[in-house]
Image (cartoon, rainbow, N blue to C red):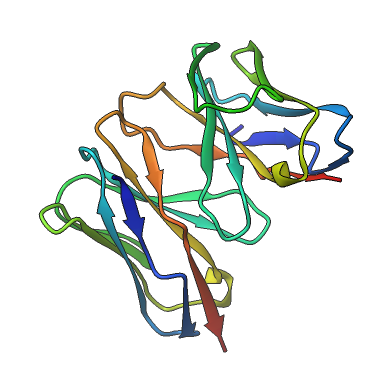
Amino acid sequence: DTEVTQTPKHLVMGMTNKKSLKCEQHMGHRAMYWYKQKAKKPPELMFVYSYEKLSINESVPSRFSPECPNSSLLNLHLHALQPEDSALYLCASSQEPSGGANVLTFGAGSRLTVL
Amino acid sequence: GQNIDQPTEMTATEGAIVQINCTYQTSGFNGLFWYQQHAGEAPTFLSYNVLDGLEEKGRFSSFLSRSKGYSYLLLKELQMKDSASYLCASLDSNYQLIWGAGTKLIIKP
């Protein structure tokens, strides 16, 4: 299995809703990432988990809450989002945590619309 | 500051060759990646260069000049399926990826 699977593919939510994005990989990768990507912009790093521990939080607002239940799963819990949070949320994994030239394997993304 | 520059959009003809340039200024350098991203899909890895020179992989080649802070991605024998965005990303001294905004490549018959 060489894939990163993200669900849901599309999500529409109101500003008062609570929802979660899910990501799964079975490649034995030890690092997992959340990126946010707006149209015609590069991916912006949000969080990095290394060996199931949060290693990087790029000053992301607390309305985004990551969780890594085990080495194969990564969640992003969403609460009280703003319309400007609408974007494509990409999950990625790499064999090892940062410290080397790790190739990222991306999921297809979850397209989030906040009304 | 850290900066990656690449053209916003390029157009080329099926069967032709196209070169997508990328210049980078990052705090330290540990290599340069190229990723391909089709609309609405995940970015996929194309190449990684850390030494100067040209690396060839089938129809795609990637070049790096560290002294010039410059890389290019060369696509030969273009096919319609090559229409996508091509993202250049530099690995800085902390092994963090600094991404360019991407080059949208349009292939015409």
**Which residue shows up at 89% across the image and 29% down it?**
A17
**Front in this rendered view, residue A47 or A93:** A47
Residue B93 in the image, given as x and y percentages of width and height: 24, 32
Vertical position of residue A107 compared to residue B13: above or below? above
**Front in this rendered view, residue B7 or A59:** A59
Q: Is residue B57 left or right of residue B43?
A: left
**Which residue shows up at 71% across the image and 46% down it?**
A84
Vertical position of residue B9 compared to residue A26: above or below? below
Q: Is residue B2 left or right of residue A30?
A: left
**Which residue shows up at 38% across the image and 43% down it?**
B98
**Which residue shows up at 66% across the image and 22% down it?**
A62
Residue A61 in the image, given as x and y percentages of width and height: 63, 27
Vertical position of residue A37 compared to residue B57: above or below? above
Residue A32 in the image, given as x and y percentages of width and height: 54, 25
Vertical position of residue A14 compared to residue B11: above or below? above
Q: How many marks?
A: 0
**Residue B63, image quadrant:** bottom left
Q: Furthest residue to the left?
A: B67
**Residue A72, image quadrant:** top right
Quarter of the image with the N terminus of chain B in it: top left
Quarter of the image with the C terminus of chain B in it: bottom right
Residue B69 in the image, given as x and y percentages of width and height: 19, 55
